[in-house]
Image (tube, rainbow, N blue to C red):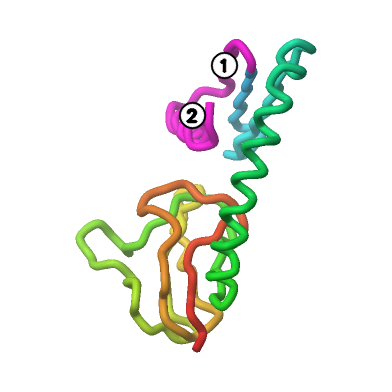
Amino acid sequence: MDLKEIQNLIRFVAKSGANEVKLEMDDIKITIKTGESHKGETTIVQQIPVSAPIAQNPATPPEAESNTKSKEPESKDSDDSKYITIKSPIIGTFYRKPSPDKSVFVEVGQSINQGDVLCVIEAMKLFNEIESEVSGKIVKVLVDDASPVEFDQPLFLVDPS
């Protein structure tokens, strides 16, 4: 179960009005609690039991994978090092448009100034405008529209020159 599936499950539970949902699969146990005592907050507890044979057998392949993966991002990071990364200040759902019938706030290649609205992030039914802290040109949008985002997740790459 990946992060997006867990976030979708949390949203589903929050909208359903259930106070607690427990999900147990072979290698994962998730408990999601909501309710009056938490005042709308959602808590997730994840436990992954690991047995000795499972932990010992795949130890070598992930290391080999991490070595090949670490080489690729280094070259990518060197290309992106001249850009400023605008990150999410909150957890929520990322939207590029103020509403479905409007156009996007910013496009790739568009020049922006400090204080320009770049996107909105919905958190607990509140839409928070995310403003640019830098001036420059949008190089890349790193998140798809209507996708869940985490705190400090990169959203945009900006070329300050």
Q: How many marks?
A: 2
C-alpha separation, residue under disc 1 versus residue under disc 2: 10 Å
Residue found at x 57% / y 62%: 75
The quarter of the displayed image where residue 74 is located: bottom right
- The type of residue carrying mark 1 is Leu
| Mark 1 or mark 2, earlier in chain | 2
SS for tag 2? Answer: helix
Which span is picked out in magenta? 1-27
> What is the secondary structure assignment of the residue under circle 1?
strand
Mark sitting on residue 121: none
Q: Are marks 1 and 2 in contact (CB under 8 Å)?
A: yes
Q: Amino acid at mark 2?
A: Leu
Whether residue 28 is situated above or below residue 81 in the rendered picture: above
Depth check, front residue: 111 or 51: 51
Residue 74 part of the magenta segment:
no
Where in the figure is residue 148, as x and y percent of width and height? 47, 47
Q: Which residue is mark 1?
A: 23
In the rendered structure, the answer to whether residue 122 lies left or right of residue 34 reads: left
**Residue at horizontal 42 percent and vertical 81 percent from the top:** 137
Q: Is residue 89 left or right of residue 132?
A: right
Q: How far across and down, in percent of the image, does residue 124 sit? A: 50, 48
Find residue 9 and name its label. 2
Q: Of all residues shown, which one is farthest toward the bottom?
A: 161
